[in-house]
Image: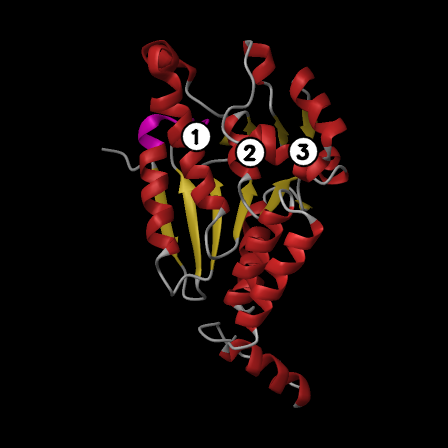
Amino acid sequence: MQELVLSERRPDGVAIVTLNNPPLNLQTLGLMRELERAIMELDGDDGIRAVVLTGAGTRAFSAGSDVKEFPALRKNFVEEKLRRENAVFSRIENMKKPVIAAICGAAMGGGCELALACDFRVIDETVKIGLPEINLGSFPGSGGLSRLPKLVGYTKAMELMCLGTVLDAGEARRIGLVNSVSAQGRALSDACELAHRLSRQALCAIRYIKQAVHAASTQTSAEAVELSLRLSEKIFQTADSREGVLAFLEKRRPVFEGAPTD
C-alpha cells in the first residue's frame, strides 16, 4: 500500500515530512493516522532539531479534507474526523522543535489549518492559500478559528473566514499569514535552509520560546511575566546558556548541544 506520509532525516538534524497523497494531498483519515505517527516519532528523536512539512508535487500543499469521506462520517463527524485532526495539529504546534511549512502548492481549508499549526510558513510565489469552508456551508473546524486571528488579527480573520477569501502569496505575506515568499520552485529549499539555521540554535531555548508565545494569548500580563521568569530560571541552568555566554565573551560562534557544526 502507498505510504501517505513520508519522512526523510537529513544529516544536519532536519527532517522533511511529506504528505504523499497527490495531486491534492487530501487529508484522509488514513493520512492523519500516518501523520500523527510520524510527528510523534520525530518529536521523540533527539537527533532531529527542526522539521519541514510539505506536500508531494506542486499542485497542492494540501487542499484540505477529502469531501468524499464526509457522507460516511456525518453521524460521527466530530469524533471520527475533527477530534483526530485537532489532536494531530496540536501535536505539531506543541512539538519540542520548530516546524516549518513549505507551501509549494495550494493550501486550502484543512491544508491552510495544517500550515497554521506550524511555527513558520514559507510559500511559493505562485501559490494561493485560504479557508473557503464557508462556501460549503461550514467553517474551519481544525484550529483555524483560533490560530488565524492570532496571526492576522480579529478583523482580517473574520473577513477571510466569513467570505472564504483566497489569498495570493504576496497578500498572505503582507498580512502576516506567512513568513516569506519564495521564487517559483524554491519554497522547499528555502524552508530547508531556514530549518538548517534553526537547527544550529539552542533547542531548549526554542522550546521555551514556543511555550511562552503559545501561552501568551490566554494569559494576563502578570501570568506571562511569571511564566517567563520560571522558564528563565530553567534556561540559565543549561549547558547551552553557558556556551552562549562563553562564545559571546570569546567572540566566536556558539556551538550548542547537538547542533550541526557546518
Tags 2 and 1 in contact by the CB under 8 Å rule?
Answer: yes
Q: Give the percent coordinates (x, y) of residue 41.
A: 33, 52
Amino acid residing under circle 3: Pro
Query: Alpha-carbon neighbours of circle 2 within 10 Å: few (<14), some, or many (≥20)?
Result: many
Label located before the other in sequence (2 or 1): 1
Position of 46 relative to 133 (above/below): below
What secondary structure is found at the residue carrying circle 3?
Answer: helix
Residue hosting label 1? 25
The magenta stretch is 22-31
Q: For the point 66% across and 41% down, which residue is it?
A: 178
Tag 2 residue: 105
Find out whether the residues at labels 1 and 3 contact each other: C-beta distance under 8 Å: no
Residue at figure coordinates x 69%, y 28% from the top left: 157
Q: Quadrant of the N terminus?
A: top left
Q: Please tell me whether residue 51 belongs to the stretch shown in magenta.
A: no
**Principal SS element in the magenta part?**
loop
Q: Quick check: marks 3 and 2 in contact, CB under 8 Å?
A: no
Q: Is residue 23 magenta?
A: yes
Which is nearer the eye, 46 or 209?
Answer: 209
Label disc, if present, on residue 155 of the rendered structure: none
At mark 1, the secondary structure is: loop
Q: Badge 3 is on which residue?
A: 149
CA–CA distance between discs 3 and 2?
Answer: 23 Å
Q: Is residue 84 left or right of residue 93?
A: left
Q: Amino acid at mark 1?
A: Asn
Q: CA distance from mark 2 to mark 1?
A: 10 Å
Structure colour scheme: secondary structure
Q: Residue at x 31, y 30 (%)?
A: 30
What's the amino acid at mark 2? Answer: Gly
